[in-house]
Image (cartoon, helix red, strand yellow):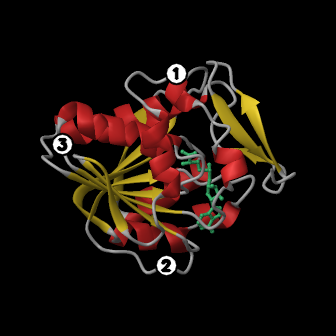
Amino acid sequence: MDDQLSIINTKDGSQSISSKNFNATYHSIHGAIEESIHVFISAGIYYKFLQGYSSLKIFEMGFGSGLNALLASLSAKKFKIPIFYHSIELYPLDKSVYSKLNFYNQIPNATEKEFLSLHESDWNHSISINEFFRLKKIKDDINVLPLEKNYDLIFYDAFAPSSQAYLWEEKLQSKLYHALNPNASLVTYCAQGKFKRILKSLGYQLDQLPGPGRKHEMTRANKV
Ligand SMILES: C[S@@+](CC[C@H](N)C(=O)[O-])C[C@H]1O[C@@H](n2cnc3c(N)ncnc32)[C@H](O)[C@@H]1O
């Protein structure tokens, strides 16, 4: 296992990964599964389903441990609503790391097979993970990748501004804004004031939502 990475236990009992290089964890230490469900699944996918979307095209910043992708694939199957999920990752995890993650033991209806198929699907190809979920993992740098222009939802799951400030700046956020359809949304755990001001200046309307666990706030930005 990469000695810059270690598996940690978070407070809801689920695992996550800690990166020494980035001085950051892949999800909240207060609960990885709790955070992913709260920020990305409930405030993102369920919100769009409630708005009446009959399919969703999602772009995820940072495939990471595959937890958001696993939960999204289960949501698509549960609601029988097709999700086309594109996820970018510049530093894919080695099998020695992801094979130690046991999210599927804590998530109802998740299986080890489906979790491993997310990690082991080919890069840069759209692959069917289940009847309602197609995954395209993109091995590239978000700063240079030209984005498709028709996403309904962005999971903005970069490491925090304290670790990777340039991923929260206007230049990249403008590129993401232009990759969204009208009425599309971006969700993130981050509620930093500077970041929210950038989103507003780009034309988003913001929903202030309570964050997961003890976190006061998260951000949902809606393109009008
Ligand atoms: C917070 S973690 C993502 C967690 C992930 N969504 C999950 O469910 O486990 C941030 C991810 O962004 C990746 N990353 C960092 N810089 C990047 C870049 N410039 N382009 C693409 N991915 C990057 C990291 O390797 C890491 O996997």
Instruction: Classify 10 Å Cα crowding around label 2: few (below 14), some (14-19), many (20 and above).
Output: few
Rendering quadrant holding ligand 1 = bottom right
Residue ID for mark 3: 81
Image vertical order of residue 144 relative to residue 223, above or below: below
Which mark is in front, 1 or 3? Answer: 1
Say which amino acid is labelled 2. Answer: Leu
Marks 2/1: CA–CA distance: 34 Å
Residue 212 visible somewhere in the drawing: no
Q: Quadrant of the C terminus?
A: bottom left
Which residue is located at x 48 percent, y 66 percent? 173
- The secondary element bearing badge 1 is classed as loop
- The secondary element bearing badge 3 is classed as loop
Residue 102 visible somewhere in the drawing: yes
Please provide percent x and percent y for residue 42: 36, 31
Residue ID for mark 2: 145
| Front residue (pair 24, 168) | 24
Instruction: Classify 10 Å Cα crowding around label 1: few (below 14), some (14-19), many (20 and above).
Output: some
